[in-house]
């Protein structure tokens, strides 16, 4: 069989999957774009009207949007800070030889496989509950008043819950990168009189730069759409204190039954996510070329 025939056969076999994927993505996106130009409320079926860009204007000028955008950025940056710094420290710890190393690595990675809803419920009821939670018992043991995290520090609580779930992922990627470091470089630096901090900042950290970039890229894409943790714990409150853009779209569409406004918010969220992904891809491309 010629090369041309082989390529044609490969394209013919791949085309059904490609068409299915395109339909899976394009049809819902096209419907969302269409609905975003309508005054479409689920409580008033058959009353749809074409209103153009009014939904976008309302969504982008809503004070809740700016609060949600700020919360989204704080959530992403906070989780990235905790997971990258914590991931590097855990990777350095797990890279050292000690008894039960394999079991400890499995335990460290295990939270990544817990569903976000389950982890949020565990944190809400077992750790952050101001009456029966573990943190409340520790506060009482130390003679302090229990602190209601979800009521008085809702966004920080969401950041901690989400970071707990993503920390194993960052640790795994960084540990893999750390194990590819040539130990002879560290030995040579140590023989030249370099201390532990110097070896870390001038050898280990530059070696982990690409892995850190990959962690930041992948996590950012997913963190922009955090939803389950907010729904289970705070419902975006108090007020909009823990509302991100994803939850704001949900509230607009399914709590206020405004499909048109929610669709406009969904398109805005997709555009913002693609802008962030574009700059992150450029950043990771430069790091890989370096």
Image (spheres, grey):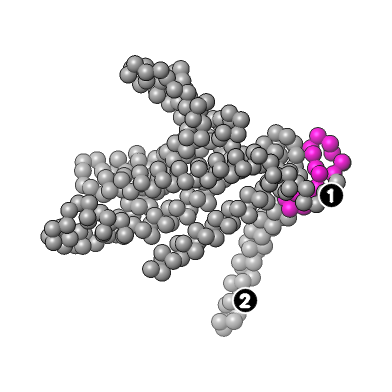
Q: In percent of the image, x 39 and y 55: which residue is there?
A: 212
Q: Main secondary structure of the magenta part?
A: loop
Q: In percent of the image, x 36 and y 46: which residue is there?
A: 85
Does the residue at mark 1 contact the one at mark 2 (Cβ under 8 Å)?
Answer: no
**What range of the chain is rendered magenta?**
32-48
Specify the quadrant of the image occupied by residue 24. bottom right
Give SS at disc 2.
helix
Using residue 253 as the reference point, say whether residue 233 is left or right of it: left
Using residue 181 as the reference point, say whether residue 209 is left or right of it: right
Using residue 276 as the reference point, say whether residue 103 is left or right of it: left
Looking at the image, which is closer to me, 158 or 3? 158
Cα separation, mark 1 vs mark 2, equals 45 Å
Looking at the image, which is closer to me, 133 or 105? 133
Give SS at disc 1.
strand
Q: Nearer the viewer, mark 1 or mark 2?
A: 1
Q: State the residue position of label 2.
A: 8
Q: Earlier in the sequence, mark 1 or mark 2?
A: 2
x then y, percent, for residue 169: 41, 47
- Image quarter of the N terminus: bottom right
Q: State the residue position of label 1.
A: 50
Looking at the image, which is closer to me, 33 or 237? 237
x then y, percent, for residue 131: 46, 17
Q: In percent of the image, x 54 and y 30: which residue is there?
A: 233
- Image quarter of the C terminus: bottom left
Specify the quadrant of the image occupied by residue 30. bottom right
Mark yes or no: residue 262 visible.
Answer: yes
């Amino acid at each position: 069989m010629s090369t041309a025939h082989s390529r044609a056969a490969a394209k013919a076999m791949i085309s059904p999957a490609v068409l299915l994927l395109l339909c899976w993505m394009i049809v819902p996106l096209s419907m969302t774009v269409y609905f975003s130009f309508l005054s479409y409320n689920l409580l008033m079926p058959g009353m749809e009207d074409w209103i153009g860009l009014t939904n976008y204007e309302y969504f982008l000028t809503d004070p809740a949007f700016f609060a949600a955008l700020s919360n989204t950025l704080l959530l992403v940056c906070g989780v990235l800070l905790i997971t990258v710094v914590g991931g590097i420290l855990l990777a350095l710890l797990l890279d050292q030889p000690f008894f039960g190393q394999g079991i400890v690595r499995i335990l460290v990675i295990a939270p990544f496989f817990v569903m976000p809803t389950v982890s949020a419920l565990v944190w809400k009821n077992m750790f952050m509950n101001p009456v029966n939670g573990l943190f409340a018992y520790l506060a009482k043991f130390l003679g302090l008043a229990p602190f209601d995290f979800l009521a008085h520090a809702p966004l920080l609580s969401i950041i901690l819950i989400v970071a707990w779930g993503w920390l194993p992922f960052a640790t795994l990627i960084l540990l893999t990168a750390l194990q590819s470091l040539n130990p002879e470089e560290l030995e040579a630096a140590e023989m030249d009189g370099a201390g532990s901090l110097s070896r870390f900042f001038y050898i280990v950290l530059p070696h982990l730069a690409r892995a850190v970039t990959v962690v930041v890229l992948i996590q950012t894409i997913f963190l922009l759409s955090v939803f389950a943790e907010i729904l289970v714990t705070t419902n975006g409150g108090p007020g909009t204190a823990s509302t991100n853009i994803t939850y704001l779209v949900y509230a607009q569409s399914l709590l206020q039954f405004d499909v048109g406004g929610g669709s406009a918010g969904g398109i805005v969220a997709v555009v913002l996510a693609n802008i962030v992904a574009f700059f992150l891809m450029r950043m990771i491309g430069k790091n890989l070329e370096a």
